[in-house]
Amino acid sequence: MGNRQTFPLAGFALAAATFAAMLLLGIDPVIAAAVGVVWVGSLLVATGRPPEEPPRVVELPIGRDSMRKLIENSHTPLLVTERNKIAVANRAARRMLGEHVIGQDARVAFRQPEAIALINEDRNGQAIVRGLVRRQDIWQINRQSVDPTRAVIELINQTAEADISRAHTDFVANASHELRTPLAAILGYVETLRESGDALDAPTAQRFLGTIEREGKRLQSLISDLMSLSRVEAEKHDLPETIIALAPLAERAARDAAGGERVSRLDIELAESPRVRGDQGQLEQVVRNLVDNALKYGAPGSEVKLVLDIAQDGMARISVIDEGEGIAPEQLPHLTRRFFRTDPGRSRASGGTGLGLAIVKHIVERHRGRLNIDSDVGKGTRVIVRLPLAPSIASDPPAATDEDAADGATEGEGDDARTASPEETSRTQSRELS
């Protein structure tokens, strides 16, 4: 800060009065002026201030308690090491590694060659380690020195990003394989027809053409399902706003899926007429896919039942029940994965693409609903879709029926008074884990 002066108005006035008095008394004007100059100069000197010293910035050492308070509530696991021993661990790190890590050597706590190398080299940097908490997880360890003896270690979970990348790679590989199979068949038969010419008898040629047509339709279905899945995933965060009457939609879509002779196997029971917010085309696709699957994989000639009602939790419920061979418990969590088939040969023979339930899952998620699958080997499968009712009619849920109670117990929702056995839990597992 520079010199700061306050104008001495009173002093100047007194100097001026003295100068005037000296002139009136007949004193030489030069002497009077000299006295005035000296007076004014002394006033200016007296009112001046020396420059202030700049404030000193004193860096206080950061104590262990200060660092603990600073990082304690961070959602990211953070550790502070002193000479490679863990001195401070925030709540997230203690929950992840255990309370015992405080005071432990960081190299012992991590037990990963990459992390140990980073710590031993006493450098700032990062390392990627696997299986730090669970066998398949992936963590990025970032180390930053604070002073010559202390460092902060940050743990970032990258498992989700790796899973997404792996799922994308698997999807591309599976899609390429599924597309190549019908294309190879089509090209092979076309080449045979071209090379054989008139030497090929009519029945054989017709059989080849039938195969080409079948594989072409399969390719068309696959591309259509891939496009549907892509559209649904792109819109999954947009909640539909259109109010739709579910009963006529479900009946129409079920009959369309059955078509021709299979309609006789359908048993449609519309116990309620709920209205929901939804995308009409996508909800029809849900019903078509479920009914088509039930008709394809149910026992030949057996009945497929479609039930529309309101569940105990006050949501619209669509149930599709078949009397097929059922699905093994270990396969239930994978049913909604893209291209997953419980019986690949049978699925391809029936024209399945392996994307039907994946599309259903994403449509149900977009409508903020729930998808549950319950199956008994040798008895059949029951697929249940729940959708929130439109707000205008969402009222108190109806009284529970015996079917509701059984359904609630099967799906593990609101059944605190009942504990399922391990076998039953496995059999009724209904969450998709892709």
Image (spheres, rainbow, N blue to C red):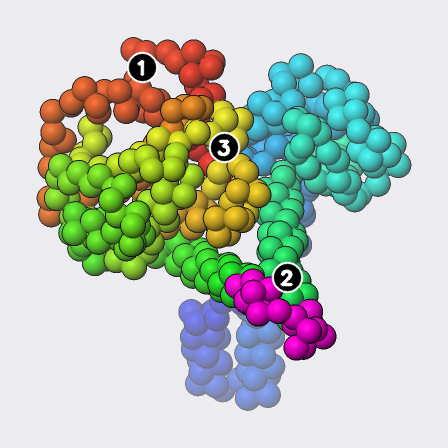
Residue 324 horizontal/vertical position (percent): 40, 32
Q: Nearer the viewer, residue 264 or 417?
A: 264
Disc 1 designates what residue?
416
Q: Nearer the viewer, residue 162 or 384?
A: 384
For label 1, the crowd category at 10 Å Cα-Cα, with few meaning under 14, some 14 to 19 and many 20 or more, is few
**Discs 1, 2 touching: Cβ within 8 Å:** no
Quadrant occupied by the N terminus: bottom right
Residue numbers of the magenta segment:
191-210
Q: Label 1 amino acid?
A: Asp
Q: Label 2 amino acid?
A: Ala
* First in residue order: circle 1 vs circle 2: 2
Q: Residue at x 55, y 78 (%)?
A: 36
Side of 294 relative to 404 (left or right): right
Tag 1 secondary structure: loop
Q: Nearer the viewer, residue 120 or 156?
A: 156
Q: Is residue 18 above or below residue 369?
A: below
Disc 3 designates what residue?
333
Q: How many marks?
A: 3
Q: Is residue 202 above or below residue 310?
A: below
Tag 3 secondary structure: helix
Residue 259 horizontal/vertical position (percent): 29, 54
